[in-house]
Image (cartoon, rainbow, N blue to C red):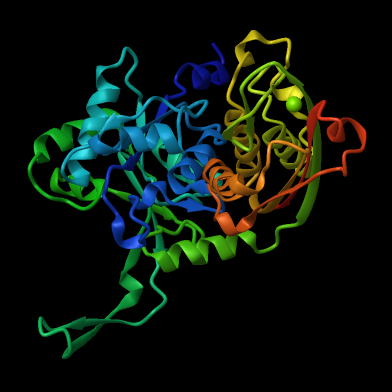
Amino acid sequence: MNSNADADAVKPTVACLVVAAGRGLRAGGGLPKQFRPIGGIPMLKRTLLSLTAIDSIDRILPVIGENDLMTYEGCIGPVPGVDAPVFGGATRQDSVRNGLEALAMGDNPPDLVLIHDGARPFAPAALVNRVVAALINGAEAVIPVIPVTDTVKRIAPDGVSILETVDRAMLRRVQTPQGFRFTTLIDAHRAAAGADLTDDAAVMEKAGIGIAAVDGDADNTKLTTAQDFEDAERRMSHGLTIRTGMGFDVHRFEPGDAVTLCGVRIPHSAGLAGHSDADVGLHALTDAILGSIAAGDIGDHFPPSDPAWKGAPSDRFLRHAAELVAARGGIIDHVDVTLICERPKIGPHKQVMKATIAAILQIDPDRVSVKATTTEKLGFTGRGEGIAAQAVATVRV
Ligand code: MG
């Protein structure tokens, strides 16, 4: 057997636990911060999507709060390459232990495990690979660290009096993912149950296990406050290119009593014919977003010949297009839809349509425009044979 075959035979499996069970309300907005959008996509989803693109990770398991399952399913839903979430506990340490126990219960517990904060959506692949490589080279526990550049003072309990200047050359800030041999970490967690330790390296320290440091990455910031989210969004948009896409769609009327336009069901003297829910507005908008990233059209992604999309609500088409933008690290800046028909009257429904589209795309309603026009009774829309829609999307990628 040659040495390459040996190396293949022992390639360890790597699982990544993504810890997102905290309440994290400091970022504002009422939602736990992991579900707050950055550039239109919830932070936790960005974190998960970026990890799915890293080859050294074999399995990704999110750990969420027990009360957050509905929010997770609504905001994030199934992500290809990511396991269904497990529930965390009262503290971060409990949450990690629950995740580790879930991995241990499966048929193939991993050889190595990474523990990553759901609030660090920008961990570069090179950083993750450094952590994994250090474990493969024999370390039991590995943490990414970055130097402290500010001068650091020790302060008295009164919060005002400075006691001394600390030698910053001996200090490091600690990031995640932290990497461990799986059996070593789960044993240390079981032994440390009940002690409130702030990171997994501390659990290993308590167990007396040596920890190696690798270089962290300044971009791998943890987002906590509303300001952090604003900074992240500004940083993401830096260096991005503006792109515009347009979409157009038509559906003809058929007997019925309601139409669905821009996600809103409107009672009408006819329905719209179509394989899905025939939402001409959302179809045009989906094509506009797909066009902006040159990702084909709605029929390429959801073939009308596929029975899976029969009667399907069109919000899933639109959400899919938005996720493709997010998967490229893009941001949806603005969308503009024009509905073209004589009837039904669109005006009374415009605000709800705006809010509906904003919720599907997870962007601010002031980035969504819905307009309507007639064609002065000319042409097929003028004769009331169907409804047309145009849309334009502006994205940065
Ligand atoms: Mg259509």
- Where is residue 305? Give x, y as percent: 73, 10
Q: Is residue 27 above or below residue 113?
A: below
Q: Residue at x 30, y 24 (%)?
A: 103
- Where is residue 389? Give x, y as percent: 77, 38
The quarter of the image holding the N terminus is top right
All told, the count of numbered labels is 0
Left/right of residue 30 with respect to residue 372 in the rendered view: left
Q: Residue at x 32, y 33 (%)?
A: 69
Q: Quadrant of residue 179?
A: top left
Q: Is residue 297 above or below residue 370?
A: above
Q: Nearer the viewer, residue 12 or 61?
A: 61
Q: Residue at x 67, y 43 (%)?
A: 346
Q: Nearer the viewer, residue 22 or 129?
A: 22
Left/right of residue 42 with respect to residue 319 in the rendered view: left
Left/right of residue 364 with respect to residue 339 in the rendered view: left
Q: Residue at x 51, y 52 (%)?
A: 122
Left/right of residue 355 with respect to residue 72 in the rendered view: right
Q: Quadrant of residue 188?
A: top left
**Res. 245 in view:** yes
Q: Quadrant of residue 2?
A: top right
**Res. 138 in view:** no
Hey, which residue is sitting farthest right in the picture?
Answer: 379
Q: Nearer the viewer, residue 264 or 86?
A: 264
Hey, which residue is sitting farthest bottom in the picture?
Answer: 161
- Where is residue 220? Give x, y as percent: 47, 56
Ligand 1 image position (quadrant):
top right
- Where is residue 17? Give x, y as percent: 35, 35
Q: Nearer the viewer, residue 293 or 368?
A: 368
